[in-house]
Image (tube, rainbow, N blue to C red):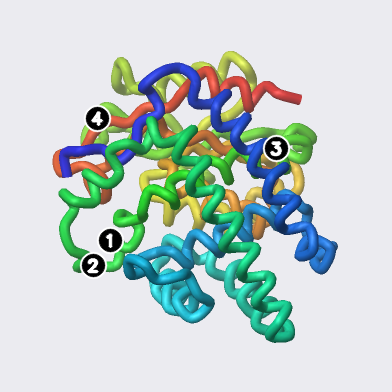
Amino acid sequence: MSVLPYSLTPGDSYYSAVEELAAEILDHTAIIFSPIIELIPVKSAEQTCLELLLLGIYARRSIETGRKPSLEHLDLVLDQLQQSKDYTYQTNILRSWQRFILGQSTSLREVIWESINDATNWFAKRSNEVLGVYTAQVNRFLGDFGACDHSEDLFCTSPMLEYHINMVGAEIFNQLWRQSFAETEQQLLVLPGCLRVDPVGCTASEWSLGYKCNHCSKGCQISELSRLGDHFGFPVSFVKHQSSFASHVQDIDKLEQRGTLGILGVACVLSLLEGGLMLEANQVPAQCVPLDFSGCKSHWHAEGLTTRVSGDRVLDLMMRG
């Protein structure tokens, strides 16, 4: 695993490109999904479009060449995803959609599924045109990765299309939740531990929502962003593993800040949707920024690489509103 599956740094245009693409996708799919949107008034049109696309995308996972995506195959994929800790909140939502579709008449069920497939086919083509430059190494990474032999491989062997829906979905979530995030009394930046330049020698102090930087290493981006937070008035913490972040968020009542705390989370691309849905389920207004590339030893790189994130993008989202 020496090839990194994605990189947001072939140029400096990723964020403007993905924002424009997200708007285009919402406009296009809102037309395709309009009959379904009318049936689900409790959800926003934007979130409905995103969730239906996700349904169509997972229906394509591990599908045989030439075979048309089906509700039967989707059920098998969701069974696999439910066995992994990396898809808990996504599968809960997609199971709800599955039950909704199966509860319709045969004719309406066929119409809904056909519209999902049409929208997903269009998304696959259009997202590759815009985002393919950033995910050009995914297939090579998958070829080097080898056969699945443990539970985390399900996450690591995600196809290119799942990278693209996470990229676009992150922007849609940012738009949907921007106002509620800005209205919170305190915004917290939560970083992943893979940003550290010296994980072994790190002297960070344990804190309520992870760890707090003690600035032990020069050139460490966690230190840089922590100093930026001190300057602009927002706290910064980091977590060593995504699972520990989930535990902290679920225990957020202990901080007596539910409803007053917003979180901007930084994560690798494939963790963006799951992290956003976890925060939404726990009623925490959120924003998110993807890592420029993924490099942790446990998932993405044999030796492990210190990752990076756009400090400009982080500051932009923290200071909006």
Is residue 251 visible in this depiction of the protein? no
Quadrant occupied by the C terminus:
top right
- Residue 124, given in percent of the width and then of the height, sits at 49, 49
Q: Give the alpha-carbon distance from disc 2 to disc 4, as whole Å.
A: 28 Å
Disc nearer the start of the sequence (1/4): 1
* Residue labelled with disc 4: 198
Quadrant occupied by the N terminus:
top left
Q: Amino acid at mark 2?
A: His
- Residue 52, given in percent of the width and then of the height, sits at 63, 61
Disc nearer the start of the sequence (3/1): 1
* Above/below status of 279 relative to 235: below
Q: Nearer the viewer, residue 303 or 230?
A: 303
Q: Amino acid at mark 4?
A: Asp
Is residue 233 visible in this depiction of the protein? yes
Disc nearer the start of the sequence (3/4): 3
Q: Residue at x 53, y 45 (%)?
A: 208
